[in-house]
Amino acid sequence: MFRELKRLGCVAYSMIFQEIRQASRLLLKNPGLTAIAGLSLAIGIGVNSALFSLTDGLLLRPLAIAQPSEVVTLVSGTNAFTGNGLSYPDYQDFRRNSRSFSANGSLSADRSGLAAFQFDTVGLAESANVQPQMRMGMLVSDNFFSALGIEPILGRAFTPDEGKISGRDAIVVLSYDQWVNQFGRGPAILGRNIRLSGIEFKVIGVMPEGFTGMDLYVHPAFYAPLTMMQRLGASAANPAANPAANPLDDRGNRFLQVKGRLRSGATREQAQAELMSIARNLEKEYPATNRNHPVLVQTEMQARFQQDPYDSALVTTLMALAGLVLLIACANVANLLLARARSRTREIAIRLAIGAGRWRLLRQLLIESALLSSIGAVLGLGFGYFGIRFFKTIPIPTDLPVSLTIQLDHRVLLFSLFTAVVCTLLFGLAPAWQAVRTDLIPALRSAGLTASSRRRTIGRDVLVIGQVALSLVLLVAAGMILDGFRKSMAMNPGFRTDHVMTMQFDTALARYTPEQSRQFYRNLVDRTRALPGVKSATLAEAVPLAPNQGAQTVIPEGYQFPKGQESASEFGEAIDESYFSTMRAPMVRGRVFNASDKAETPAVAIVNEAFAAKYWPNQDAIGKRIRLHDSKGPLVEVVGIAKTSRYLFIAEPPTPFLYLPFAQQPSSQMAVLVETNDDPATIAAPLRDVVRTLDANMPIYNSRTLSNFYQMRAVSVLLIILELVSAMGLLGLALALVGLYGLIAYSVSRRTQEIGVRMALGANRGSVVKMVLRQGLILSLVGIAIGFAASLGVRGVLTRGLIGLGTSNPAVLILVPLGLLVVTIAACYVPAHRASQVDPIRALRYE
């Protein structure tokens, strides 16, 4: 029995191998068809592979941990705003009382599956005599590594006892890259002391090379206990807090990010129900801080999409456009295969007549399609590689360890393989099925137009109509995006970008107290203004368009939140009194901050137009008050309304924004923006000298001109998107034109004898051209009509998804169809002109 099965298996493999050889020979005998089909598929697969790599690096790549699908994200509040995490006391309560999460199957609190962490920036030095370098790391709970299933390759991780007492355990685990780059990959690193923000930490372990932390962009250099937060000065999570207070004791300070590994058999819904029950109990016990603060359990993908909705919408749109290019390419190849099936009608009929089974013929034809897909996939990976290299030119204007991982790895290869299989089914199945359904007797008797060939002709017409419709949708979408981004680039961002030099500092790295920080920045601004060539200087918590814009929890006076919500998070920053004049940011009404706005005077604020329109529609925002942080936080009075500008992305929608005076809301992280008379780069060296005279150990980062930053952050990124969208639109159009040209040329070749008869009976060349053009024009008009209707829906989707594009230009919906009609007629004219040159005598002899 076993030998018989083995023999049958060998026979099956032999048959498949023979069919692959036969399919290869047939493709080699038709180099034109193979080249066009392979190139069409390569374009479609290459575009999708490159964009998948970008999407994977931005959103899809799973965490580099054991069983990442078991890990979920916990966020606090009904509005899952970025950074809306859990407080440390709440985290401890959830960790003690939940049973839905576990690490290594344990349900004890010491080895709970709930892990907390917080990013922190420090000055890292090998010793007290070495200049510290700015590094970003993570402060993590004691069970962080065990919950995520990560084991150090050197040394050990934290023990449960090392996460109990605040400020006691000055130990650190290094990342693999930090160990290699700064410490030479030596095993002697274990037990060695290094300095983080001036504090000695003992190195106890090194993480494996593949583990790059819990963020797709930020790769931490080290991991230290969360209980060291206060000593490291990481209370920057709440800059307005009392420096003597420990942020880990503040139940209202929700700065922690929390991940949880579901125990075996537990579902996300069960975990959600359990945590909601615990949250209700906490609300009863601590109503002042926990009222209306439920906990949501999200998948990693849900958390990423909600944290970065604009990038999510953008890459989803780009992937959809790439999908349209692939569909057009598949329709192109299907058209070619249908035409080829027509020429093989007699061959297939003969093979059926001598006993070949229809299923075997279907398999043979699908193998040919699979070989075409394989050629397209291999060539597509080449195109995809160049696309990935193009994406790697996306600039990231920061000195922080932020990187975008775009690479041709196994995930891209698997995606390309999957795409090739889908392509085989999309373009190969229908032509193959039509071919094996050939009417046997008519096909053997005649080489003319049988019922089966008529079905193929109709099928090819439908495919060409679909190509034209899809190309119109693609072009309209591309036109909308291009027009929207063009308007964004031409629009005034709301601040000046020329003649400004920027430098950023974090006094927490030098362990400054809030008073020392305030004095440092005041001295820095005063001495900078005294430098030759400086017109003015100002302080801001973040540079415009920088990704590190801060957020403020606000409760605007008189605003009624939805049921269950008591506050909102809006972007905001601390600035000094010279900000609006230095940056030429226009005010609409009210006043700017001035020297009289001090810590001991009534707290004030400036809001932008979007903030005022959102919270006080049809009212005067001047004089309104806003409570910060929570229901017991300080009240600030609105004294001015600024014009809405751009804060994170040049094409973002109108975004509410809050300005607070630095004197009343100090922060350790600030940027100095210096307006100069001449080239701002020339002030960089004198400005560094000023910093060194104030504190030689103060780290300086992100030192660049604002025009350079604006070019990298706004213009370069938009240009890359514009080039990408333009390329996809042109590729889709080219593929559709090739399909239309191929259909008309094929139709002319099949009607050669008919054309000869018409010309022999007196038809002139002009009438022949009109006859052929009429066929192409009808197909184009039907495709354009269908595509126009679909474009109206796409227009609405793009307007809602990419709000920053603004109102789409109606001219796009007029010019694109007209332009497409012109180029499709031009594509039809070539075979039409060729048909008019037919010699009637030769045509009458044509078979």
Image (spheres, grey):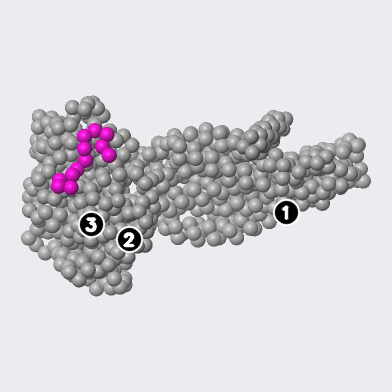
Q: Give the secondary structure at mark 3.
A: helix
- What residue type is disc 2 on? Ala
Q: Quadrant of the N terminus?
A: top right
Q: Nearer the viewer, residue 153 or 326?
A: 153
- What residue type is disc 1 on? Ile
Q: Is residue 334 above or below residue 688?
A: below
Location of residue 3 in the rendering, given as x and y in whole percent from the top left corner? 64, 34
Q: Quadrant of residue 127 in the image? A: top left
Q: Kindly identify which residue carries mark 3.
A: 95
- What residue type is disc 3 on? Arg
Q: Which mark is residue 271?
A: 2
User: How far is the residue under mark 3 from the one under mark 1?
Assistant: 68 Å
Based on the picture, tell me whether residue 55 belongs to the magenta stretch. no
Q: Kindly identify which residue carries mark 1.
A: 778
Viewer-nearest of discs 3 and 1: 3
Question: Which contiguous range is marked in magenta?
Answer: 151-162
Which residue does the image show at 26% across and 44% down from the upper left? Answer: 145
